[in-house]
Image: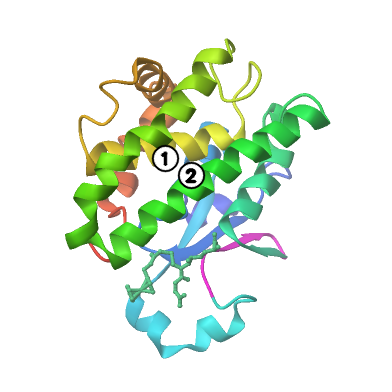
Amino acid sequence: MCSVGRRQTRTKKMPAYVITYFAVRGRCETMRMLLADQGQEWKENEVTFDTWKKGDLKATCVFGQLPKFEDGDFTLYQSNAILRYLARVHGKRRLYGKDDKQAALIDMMNDSCEDLRLKYVRMIYQDYENGKAKYIEALPSDLSKFEKILSDNKGGFLVGGQISYADYHLLDLLLNHQVLSPGCLDSFPVLKSYVARLSARPKIKAFLESDAHKSRPINGNGKQ
Ligand code: 6SG
């Protein structure tokens, strides 16, 4: 999926994508799922925490953080900007809706995914021992919003009738939340079947079953 050897046989259709990140799912599993589902190849440039702590790589990153994403000689930072870039480039009708209004709604959905991700990340990294139970208790309030959105939109996705980059983001979040709290989708049948349906897309299924995915911890501190 991401061997250097294969890059040599790439045609123009096969961009030289490189993801530079820690060996975790974290902020990159959404873009990895998007790329896998779109039949793209990429190379992983794994950074150990020890290397990162030395500071040399950090000093070269525009905002001092990873992930870094390269498409040939084009370099991007900020995981959501990377998702939007890939959304503009891939997909039958791109992964960004059919017009400007759908694109704006897809951005809106992704912003709400980002809100939930930030809450999750803060709990995982700053408050896991004390805050986990409270976080799980409050989770239905967030999940119910997505349940209603998906029930109201008959197209099977967050917006319209085609997958968008925000769907990959929500899928990643829901998969992580099912690890945090295995029964958390039981009272949300629409979300539950959405996760099952997207996870069963052949290329996503293969990705989720891959050693590369399974061997990466969700978070950098081992909490999940
Ligand atoms: C952390 O926060 O793994 N990037 C992270 N951390 C290192 O020096 N808005 C952007 C975006 O969407 C957020 C980037 C994100 O792209 S991801 C980063 O660069 C830094 O700031 C989550 C993750 N964290 C584990 C980690 C590695 C280094 C610091 C945190 C574990 C803890 C301390 C060392 C090893 Fe650690």
Q: Percent from the top left, x then y, of residue 138?
A: 31, 41
Badge 1: residue crowd in 10 Å (few <14, some 14–19, many ≥20): many
- Asked whether 50 or 63 is in front, the reply is 63
- Asked whether 92 or 58 is in front, the reply is 58
Could you tell me which residue is drawn at 59 percent across and 36 percent down?
109
Quadrant where the N terminus sits is top left
Could you tell me which residue is drawn at 66 percent across and 54 percent down?
81
Residue assigned mark 1: 172
User: Left or right: where does residue 167 sit relative to residue 210?
Assistant: right
* Quarter holding ligand 1: bottom left
Q: Earlier in the sequence, mark 2 or mark 1?
A: 2
Q: What label does residue 30 carry, if any?
A: 2
Numbered range of the magenta stretch: 65-73
Q: Are marks 2 and 1 in contact (CB under 8 Å)?
A: yes
Measured Cα–Cα span from mark 2 to mark 1:
6 Å
**The image quarter in which residue 188 lies:** top left
Q: Callout 2, which amino acid? A: Thr
Q: Callout 1, which amino acid? A: Asp
Q: Can residue 210 be seen?
A: no
Residue at mark 2: C-beta within 8 A of ligand 1: no
